[in-house]
Image (cartoon, grey):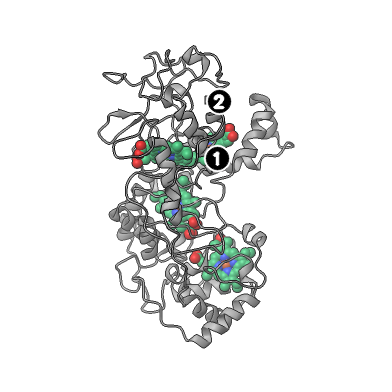
Amino acid sequence: MLGLALAACGSGRPRGEDGGAIGQVDAGPPPPRWTPAARADALAAGEAVITKHQCTRCHELDGRPGAGRPYDCVSCHVFLTSLTPTDPRYQKIAANNGQDVLDRYIRNIAHLRQVPSLTAIGRRLRPAWIAEFLQHPLDLRPALDDAMLRNTVTPDDARALARYFAAVADVPADGEPGSALTPAPTPDPDRVARGRAVFEQRGCPACHVVGNERFAGQTAASLAQNPLAPDLRFARARLGPETMVAWIMDPPAVWPAATMPKLGVSRADAELIRDYLAAPVALPPAPPVEPLLAMPPAATHRVSWDEVKERVLGKVCVHCHMNDHEKDVGPGNLGGLGYAGRGLAMRTYEMLVRGARGPDGKRYSVLQRQPGEAWPRILEVMVRRRVENLRDHVTPLADHDRPAYPAGALGMPMGLPTMTDEEIGLLRRWIEDGCPGPTRVTGRPGFTDGFLVPDGPIKPNRGCQLRAPAAKPPRWSTRPLEPAPATPP
Ligand code: HEC
Ligand code: HEC
Ligand code: HEC
Ligand code: HEC
């Protein structure tokens, strides 16, 4: 299976086709060739980690088959948002599901559409940097709204992945001679200044930022048009000095998947730019955390379940917290992306009040405060995301030092920009009003639910505490409902 997957990928090309030196991460002694056995080992070990963490749900990776529907976040989003009314596939889906529904999908999908390809990335990125990044990811592309996930990759997993990427690209892996993160040589200030001037003249700032440095020819629009261009303040750690020069001269020769065009930069100019990019970039300190932790005010109007679902939980959260019978588009419910899953579903009221499973396997209400916390858990995690965003989400020219991720529970929505004050305020008000449910569930007037999937109705509405749905699963359910908690409160 591995051999098959690799036969389709760029790494299968005969070496030397695009210049033998390209495979070298750094200038220096030539890398030891991967023996076939060592390579096969590294590929198999890396493949196991890739499978465990489902990296192909988002990334293109060495010609591996994508995760497939309904697992593949990016390909489905790209597919849907690329449909136009003249496309027969658009017409077919519109006929089956309603044109208004399809148009809403296309309008609403904003994230996980553009994600960097990982195919043969060892040709561009140092394995040692990859291993470090996987354990401590941070926003690399300020014009891209999405971030690499905070994940459960262990140091061993990270090493296995770094070796995998090195083996695919046939460059030395972490720990082998010539591959370590060599300290950047102290650049000559005169060359740094000249490199900066060339960088500006050649139009590089149209696509790239370098920390918060200001350049002529850079506009918010030009940056937004090229969201996959990394902040080049990271380039000194990501690329070896020789790779950097080769890249600036001819990106597709270094990395077949390159989208950066060849700009006809001479070697002398490329070396000047490399020296400019080798200089460290000064950044302001991170903003203080306390204001980020303040809970936004509750909405001033009475908020219905419909509104909460439509504007908050159903807008973003449900996509990882689907109901049980919706199979596997639910890393936060049934598990995925390397997480075991916490059994938290949000599509319907009945499933939301079933709560989440703690590390001990016991269920707790996410609509109530947990010991030691100031707010119901679901609000806590949304506010925590704002602190994570100090690492995960900077905007162009507003970068700052990146503090470590806060310890403790993951912020939500995982990997995505934080919800707005207004959205959090809606959920807060709904919880403060006692989590009023839809009429069909509660028997109370005033709330309707336009999209009720009967996972099992709960008759009385008793506020926000933990409740179990009825034991009877819907007809089409692919799995039995969990047994009810022993003593529902
Ligand atoms: C939910 C989607 C998602 C999943 C799953 C995911 N990533 Fe990512 N990854 C991203 C996004 C988005 C970025 C771009 C982040 C940025 O540039 O700031 C990224 C960036 C990266 C980068 C940096 C690449 C570059 O060119 O800068 C590496 C390496 C990476 N991911 C590896 C992995 C690996 C290995 C896995 C599996 C363990 C994985 N990712 C799983 C979304 C994902
Ligand atoms: C089968 C296709 C499909 C797959 C697979 C899929 N999505 Fe979506 N996604 C959609 C559709 C359709 C919408 C818009 C739904 C709506 O507006 O009612 C959407 C919307 C979203 C949104 C809210 C809009 C936005 O862009 O912020 C998020 C977040 C999201 N999906 C995340 C994910 C994640 C994470 C995965 C993988 C774990 C995933 N999706 C897999 C089809 C898919
Ligand atoms: C049209 C947009 C565009 C322009 C102009 C551009 N780049 Fe890029 N550059 C990219 C993209 C996109 C990437 C990410 C890799 C890819 O997709 O090719 C990239 C990657 C890089 C990298 C690798 C960085 C990393 O961290 O992976 C370097 C170095 C780089 N560019 C330098 C330059 C220099 C120097 C110039 C000017 C001579 C320049 N770029 C002009 C779009 C651009
Ligand atoms: C990209 C996928 C994804 C999105 C989007 C997402 N979640 Fe999660 N969520 C997860 C995963 C995975 C877990 C399990 C994390 C773990 O095991 O630590 C989780 C767990 C949770 C938990 C239980 C955590 C705890 O500590 O009690 C809550 C509550 C939660 N999510 C709320 C939300 C809310 C609210 C949103 C929308 C604002 C959201 N999630 C969006 C993936 C996601």
Q: Secondary structure at mark 2?
A: helix
Q: Position of residue 138 (x, y in %)?
A: 43, 57
User: Which amino acid lies under the numbered mark 2 shown in the image of this protein?
Assistant: Asp
Residue 162 falls in which quadrant of the image? bottom left
Q: CA distance from mark 2 to mark 1?
A: 16 Å
Q: Is residue 345 above or below residue 41?
A: above
Q: Dot 1 corresponds to which residue?
A: 422
Q: Could you tell me which residue is drawn at 52 percent across and 15 percent down? A: 439
Would you say residue 489 is visible in this rendering?
yes
Would you say residue 9 is visible in this rendering?
no
Q: Quadrant of the C terminus?
A: top left
| Residues packed near mark 2 inside 10 Å, few (<14), some (14 to 19) or many (20 plus) | some
User: Which amino acid lies under the numbered mark 1 shown in the image of this protein?
Assistant: Glu
Q: Is residue 487 above or below residue 341?
A: above
Ligand 4 visible in quadrant? top left
Q: Quadrant of the N terminus?
A: top left
Label annotation for residue 325:
none
Residue 353 falls in which quadrant of the image? top left
Q: Dot 2 corresponds to which residue?
A: 306
Q: Is residue 461 above or below residue 115?
A: above
